[in-house]
Image: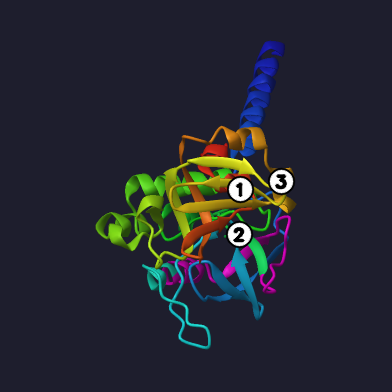
Amino acid sequence: MFKTTLSLLLLISASLLSWSTLAAEDSCAADKIDLWTKATYATNGSNLIIQGKRVRLNGLYAPQIERKQKFHTPGEPLAKESQTFFNKLLANNDLEVGVEYDKTKVDEFGRQLVHLFLRDGTNVQQKILESGFAVTRIENGNIKHMKCYFDAEKKARKGGFQLWDYLAKHPESHFPLAKSSELTSQDEGFRIIQGKVLKVEKSSTNYIINMDTTGIRVPKRYWDFFDYSQIKKLKGQTIEVRGQAYLYQGVMFMIIDHPYSIDKLNPAT
């Protein structure tokens, strides 16, 4: 009897330990849902309306829908399809969503920044990314669930889903990924840029990482997040950097604020 009871207790303990280990390793699960509420609709593949307020998903960039208002925003590939996928995901779950906040709760445009979940535990960002309708983005210091998001993107990229399929069929689009040596003046906007690092140096205001045609800058206010000794090791390596690309005096630049923006500095990749 004693042996049976002891064996049962050991089995239960092992099961609980195994479950705890799995839960700890599940980088997609919510740490704590701050709010359960009803969404209204997605305005694109990464933004939605909740309780009449504009809300943006942390950790991803979805293609932008063309806008012809005061400031013209060109449309990006599969923008409508990405929005439709997001809206169907919400509709199939009665628009009920769980909101989890990160370090930064509101961006400079007044949009709430959230990680979004469904009642069954589904991480909405993970679902969108692994379906190929968005790519991972690091912004505002919000890096919760980043391993989950990069793994989801990797799955879509390996499978050639949606945006990755589009890129394979239309390499001239340079979206969502472009080689630094092939960039043109039309390639401003969010991009993953791939290229060889030719120069690394430090000025009084920036860490400087130069590819052949792309200048990556890390402003001094973000230096505490970086290890400059690791940045120096990038010289001669082919890297992928992701962020907002902009043209200045005929040269493409990208300002990054977190090492996860560069694949070689990102433990999740």
Identify the disc placed on residue 162: none
Write down the quadrant of residue 131 in the picture. Answer: bottom left
Q: Amino acid at mark 3?
A: Trp
Question: Residue 190 versus residue 102: which sits nearer the camera?
Answer: 190
The image position of residue 218, as x and y in percent, is 64, 50
Label 3 with label 2: CB-CB less than 8 Å: no
Q: CA distance from mark 1 to mark 3?
A: 22 Å
Image side of residue 101 versus residue 268, left or right: right
Sequence order check, earlier mark of 1 and 2:
2
Sequence order check, earlier mark of 1 and 3:
1
Which residue is label 3 attached to? 223
Q: Residue furthest bottom?
A: 70
Local secondary structure at mark 2? loop
Write down the quadrant of residue 19 in the picture. Answer: top right
Whether residue 158 is visible to the viewer of this picture, yes or no, is yes
The image position of residue 197, as x and y in percent, is 48, 41
Question: Residue 95 versus residue 149: which sits nearer the camera?
Answer: 149
Label 1 with label 2: CB-CB less than 8 Å: yes
The image position of residue 196, as x and y in percent, is 43, 41
Question: Which range of residues does the magenta coloring cover?
Answer: 83-111
Sequence order check, earlier mark of 3 and 2:
2
Q: CA distance from mark 1 to mark 2?
A: 9 Å
Local secondary structure at mark 3? helix
Label 1 with label 3: CB-CB less than 8 Å: no
Identify the disc placed on residue 58: 2
Which residue is label 1 attached to? 145
Image side of residue 106 versus residue 217, left or right: right
Question: Residue 201 versus residue 45: which sits nearer the camera?
Answer: 201
Q: Amino acid at mark 1?
A: His
Q: Residue furthest top?
A: 3
Q: CA distance from mark 3 to mark 2?
A: 22 Å
